[in-house]
Amino acid sequence: MIHSMTAFGSARSEFLLGSVSVELKGVNSRYLDLAFRIPDELRHAETALRELLGSHLKRGKLEVRVSFARSGSLQQRAFEVDQLTLINERYLAARKIIPDLAAPGMSDLLHWPAPNEYNEDDSPAMWLNQCMQAGRSALQELILARAREGTRLATAMLEAADEMKKVIATIEERLPGILEEYRKKLAGKLTDTLNAACPNGFEQISGAELSARIASESSLFSLRIDVAEELTRLDSHLKELSVILSTGKSESKSAAKSLSLGKRLDFLFQEMNREVNTLGSKSSSLEITQSVIDLKLLIEQLREQAQNIE
């Protein structure tokens, strides 16, 4: 299946002590680039999250945001006398060393953990477990979103490939006419040249000899504009593209298995561009030149779409 690198996923895990939220935001990148924004209290979960994401994703720049909240409303907390006394004792002890130390404000008091909030369940392992649970759910949502976007990209690329097939068919249909036009122009030039050089030249040269000369020059011209090989290779590349986009993998067994799908597509478009450049160098008419330009524009569209594919 085709997966885009541009997607978003989020999840929240709640338990007795609070909740953990994980947000994943992905954009395209040549390699897998993970950027974490995680509070210090959950910094111990970064390694596990990095391993989880790295085992499922190959490419893309992913921003990972992790946040948490403890249970209970701070606005509804009641201050206990023992707690305030303890805070005051610690503050006075600290002022003996730091005389200019400011007194704690109301916000500091609200966030100060109450004695009953310290228990054996409030451990790093508990928060790590909830963080990983939220991370797995967010990753699943991200993968589904990447698959949906990948389907849209594949559809757009197949439409561009169909347009390329139409342009190629137009070139193949036009080539015999180009050769016939060249024969007529060549016959006219030879006739005009012979009449200019010798007004009675046709009395000294037979029609068969003139036809043979025209046929010889036409054969050389047809060899110079022969693009059958380039068109055949382009058609082969388009078939390979259809296979990749339809099944999510290449039929080629020789391709490096370590390469991501997006990189294989990029190499395929390079080969397409090479064939179109050769086709352009052999172009002998304005119509084919315009078709070559159309093909190059379509290949560039394919390349831009492929940059978002993993």
Image: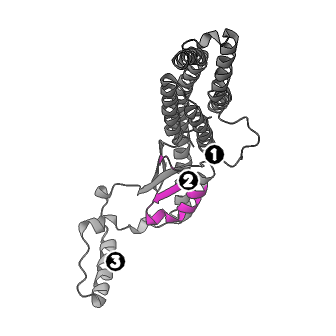
Give the magenta-colored segment's residue range: 25-51
Looking at the rendered image, the disc whose residue lies closer to the viewer, 3 or 2, is 2
Amino acid at circle 2: Leu
Mark closest to the chain's N terminus, 3 or 2: 2
Return the residue at label 1. Answer: 260
Of residue 138 and residue 277, the one placed in the foreground of this image is 277
- Looking at the rendered structure, the secondary structure element under dot 3 is helix
> Residue 48: within the magenta?
yes
Of residue 222 and residue 52, the one placed in the foreground of this image is 222
Distance in Å between CA atoms under marks 1 and 2: 11 Å
* Rendered image: mark on residue 235: none
Distance in Å between CA atoms under marks 3 and 2: 49 Å
Question: Quarter of the image containing the N terminus?
Answer: top right
* Residue under the image location 68 percent in, 36 percent down: 249
Residue 147 makes an appearance in the image: yes
* Rendered image: mark on residue 86: 3
Looking at the rendered image, the disc whose residue lies closer to the viewer, 3 or 1, is 1
> Residue 39: within the magenta?
yes
Q: Is residue 132 above or below residue 85?
A: above
* Residue under the image location 46 percent in, 53 percent down: 63
* Rendered image: mark on residue 32: 2
Pointer 3: residues within 10 angstroms few (<14), some, or many (20+)?
Answer: few
